[in-house]
Image: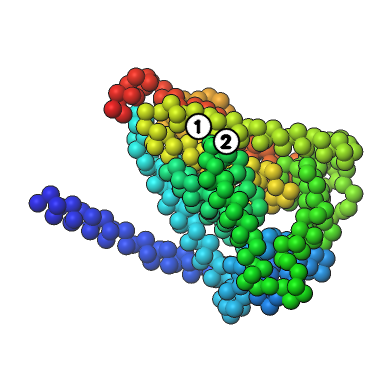
């Protein structure tokens, strides 16, 4: 009888969810039409990727900085997913890209929903409405900008979330998903630090080996017509001019003082040095001082070192919380997302070039912080950092403060400083994760877990 009731209940639940199908279909149809309607704008990224995939399949040069209005600048592996896109009819490319990105968002939301509703020993039951309210308030804005720009940043977010899903279960296979992201955009190599600090040598080995293999894969699959290596040309054209502690600066690709670059090095370059090359996104009045390039480089290196140190502290706090927990698997599920969220903040802060759509990774610290605020200790510092992040990020959108003021805030690096606040809040959350919620003693938590 109980089995029959359970079967009937499950069937009713599945039936009640069927109404989502026509809604999702309608969103995909409308979104595809909206994306295609905007496809003619100059700031769309999809044509850059598709052209790169088409040229790679033909063995032609894909790195044409100065020749193309928007050149392809990513590692060679990043062009592979767009080889099949180049073979689609032109009218189908944008709708197909929208549907793929929308599917990634749905899968990310599904995993974060499962994270938000998990059982936590000694903590109150989940409040999913508040969890999603806080998560979307912090993290939604730049997810939408990915769709507007037709960029490939949701592919990176997808690989990072897959790494988080594996890491929350304590599996070294997280390194394989991180390697896919690193081969696509290099910055997920920061996961090496996470795995090394947690003494997961297998994960470190898997990450480095898989990244190298995927990076060299295009040379085997689609060799260049001139016999050179894709990797070597990518390095010569796009990386050779970059310096440690410097920001992205290359004729025909990046302006060092463009406020579209919200990485830490980009923001410090704008604030500490005077612009030399004018541009559409360069504010000549934003510099606080006019330091030399060498002094700016030193300041940037110090700031980047501090970011790495803060991330390392977060990982060590997480390891301590797991070691001290009665239920280590449950604690790893909690702090695992926080560790990956800290890495995600580092990815956009430490990159030489971070456009606003790259900050779709805010979803990860947003979800972790929402969980800590709702089910962790009452923490005034955490609320203060969250308020600062909201003030610098979502509450400074063009629709709220006007385009002119929003652009001025971008020049000052508001997205950068919002990410710094999110990183600090995430590490604070990792520090307090091993402590029982307010009003629950450690002894009562242990008894409850037993």
The structure residue drawn at horizontal position 39% and vertical position 36%, both measured from the top left corner, is: 330
The structure residue drawn at horizontal position 54% and vertical position 70%, both measured from the top left corner, is: 96
Q: Nearer the viewer, residue 286 or 370?
A: 370
From mark 2 to mark 1, how far is it between C-alphas?
A: 9 Å
Q: Is residue 387 visible?
A: no
Disc 2: CA contacts within 10 A as few (<14), some (14-19) or many (>=20): some
N-terminal-most mark, 2 or 1: 2
Q: Nearer the viewer, residue 147 or 222?
A: 222
Give the left or right position of residue 41, taking residue 19 as reference: right
Q: Is residue 22 visible?
A: yes
Residue 256, position in %: x, y? Answer: 81, 50
Quarter assignment of residue 334: top left
Q: Nearer the viewer, residue 54 or 396?
A: 54
Disc 1: CA contacts within 10 A as few (<14), some (14-19) or many (>=20): many
Residue 134, position in %: x, y? Answer: 49, 40
Give the left or right position of residue 267, taking residue 150 as reference: right
Q: In the rendered image, which residue does mark 2 sit on?
A: 197
């Amino acid at each position: 009888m109980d089995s029959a009731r359970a079967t009937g209940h499950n069937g009713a639940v599945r039936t009640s969810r069927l109404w989502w199908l026509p809604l999702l279909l309608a969103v995909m149809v409308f979104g595809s039409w909206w994306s295609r309607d905007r496809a003619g704008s100059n700031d769309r990224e999809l044509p850059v990727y598709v052209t790169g995939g088409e040229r790679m399949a033909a063995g032609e040069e894909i790195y044409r900085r100065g020749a193309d209005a928007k050149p392809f600048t990513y590692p060679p592996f990043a062009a592979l997913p767009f080889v099949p896109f180049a073979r689609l009819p032109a009218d189908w490319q944008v709708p197909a890209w929208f549907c793929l990105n929308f599917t990634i968002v749905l899968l990310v939301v599904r995993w974060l929903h499962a994270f938000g509703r998990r059982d936590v020993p000694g903590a109150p039951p989940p409040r999913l409405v508040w969890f999603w309210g806080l998560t979307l308030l912090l993290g939604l804005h730049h997810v939408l900008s990915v769709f507007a720009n037709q960029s490939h940043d949701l592919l990176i977010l997808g690989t990072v979330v897959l790494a988080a899903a594996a890491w929350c279960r304590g599996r070294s296979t997280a390194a394989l998903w991180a390697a896919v992201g690193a081969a696509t955009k290099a910055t997920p190599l920061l996961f090496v630090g996470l795995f090394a600090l947690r003494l997961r040598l297998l994960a470190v080995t898997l990450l480095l080996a898989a990244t190298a293999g995927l990076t060299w894969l295009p040379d085997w699959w689609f060799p260049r017509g001139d016999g050179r290596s894709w990797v070597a040309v990518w390095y010569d054209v796009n990386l050779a001019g970059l310096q440690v502690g410097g920001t992205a600066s290359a004729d025909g690709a990046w302006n060092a003082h463009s406020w579209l670059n919200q990485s830490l090095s980009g923001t410090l370059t704008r604030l500490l040095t005077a612009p030399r090359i004018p541009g559409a996104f360069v504010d000549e009045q934003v510099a606080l001082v006019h330091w030399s390039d060498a002094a700016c480089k030193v300041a940037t290196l110090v700031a980047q070192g501090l970011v790495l140190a803060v991330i390392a502290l977060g990982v060590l706090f997480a390891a301590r919380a797991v070691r001290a927990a009665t239920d280590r698997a449950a604690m790893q599920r909690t702090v695992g997302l926080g560790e990956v969220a800290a890495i995600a903040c580092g990815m956009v802060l430490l990159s030489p070039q971070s456009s606003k759509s790259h900050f779709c990774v805010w979803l990860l610290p947003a979800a972790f912080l929402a969980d800590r605020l709702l089910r962790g200790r009452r923490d005034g510092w955490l609320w203060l950092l969250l308020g600062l992040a909201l003030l610098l990020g979502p509450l400074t959108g063009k629709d709220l403060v006007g385009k002119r003021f929003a652009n001025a805030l971008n020049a000052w690096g508001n997205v950068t400083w919002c990410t710094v606040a999110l990183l600090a809040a995430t590490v604070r959350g990792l520090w307090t994760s091993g402590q029982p919620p307010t009003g629950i003693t450690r002894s009562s938590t242990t008894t409850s877990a037993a």
